[in-house]
Image: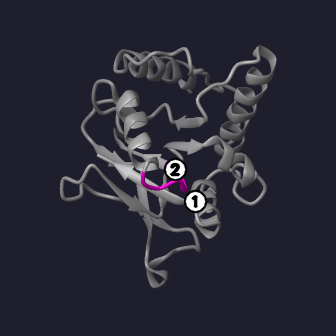
Amino acid sequence: ENYDEKLNKMNELSLLYNKTSYNRYMFCGVSERLWYTQSANRLFEIRDMYEKIYETNYDRRFLIFNPDHYPFEENWLTKMISRWDEIESKDKNICTLGTLQYFTEQMTDIWHWGCNFKPESERCHALDWYHMHNYNGESYVKCDGNTGSGLMIDSDKFKELNMLDAVKHHHYASDSDFCLRASEKGYTHYCCN
């Protein structure tokens, strides 16, 4: 009901907690009442369209961020981009990156965007996975993928894999499906603290 209000608050918090230079980045939200998958794909198409219209090159990374998640620390986006660059210097196949975020407006529950698939015997469906918990103080770890509530994606790979599958997975499981398809192509996923 308060989607627009939440989106504005999320944008305000995101900008407040991040002091990076925005000339290479475009921030936009879809306030239409679309299913998750359509919204994410629509945002990517808008980004693509703006690049062509304004003849500019945005950063090739594309970030999907739900309005019910909140930044965990100051400069979270700058740190996330730096972590991506660090990982990519060792692994050119990086496709998605997740991080820690608060899941509630009260900023009490901390979630990793990084996920791993459950053992096949425990899955409710083929794409069933779980959020990672804190891990041994490492700055980043490999994972099976990142949840759609917040993931940074390589735009070229996103386009190559035909974005999220809005036909089979119009709401839930489009994120795990995308990450699985990316892994099958040899691309990798990471989550950072």
* Amino acid at circle 2: Thr
- Tell me, yes or no, whether the highlighted magenta stretch contains residue 149: no
Q: How many marks?
A: 2
Assess whether mark 2 and mark 1 are in contact (beta carbons under 8 angstroms): yes
- 94 falls in the magenta region: yes
Q: Is residue 183 above or below residue 29?
A: below
Can you tell which quarter of the image residue 134 is in?
Answer: bottom left
Q: Amino acid at mark 1?
A: Cys
Identify the mark nearer the N-term, 1 or 2.
2
What x and y, as percent, mark residue 114? Answer: 41, 54
Residue at figure coordinates x 80%, y 23% from the top left: 52
Up-down relation of residue 113 to residue 9 (above or below): below
> Which residue is denoted by mark 1 in the rendering?
179
The range drawn in magenta is 90-96
- Kindly report the distance in space between the C-alpha atoms of the residues bearing marks 1 and 2: 8 Å
Viewer-nearest residue: 156 or 17: 156
Q: Quadrant of residue 161?
A: bottom right
Frontmost residue, 178 versus 157: 157
Specify whether 1 is left or right of 41: left
Q: Quadrant of residue 115?
A: bottom left
Using the image as rendered, state which of residue 30 and residue 44 is in the foreground. Answer: 44
Give percent across and percent down for residue 132: 34, 59
Is residue 139 rendered to the left or right of residue 4?
left
Q: Nearer the viewer, mark 1 or mark 2?
A: 2
Q: Which residue is mark 2?
A: 96
Residue at the (46%, 66%) spot, across then down: 129
Residue at coordinates 27% horizontally, 49% vertically from top-left?
A: 139
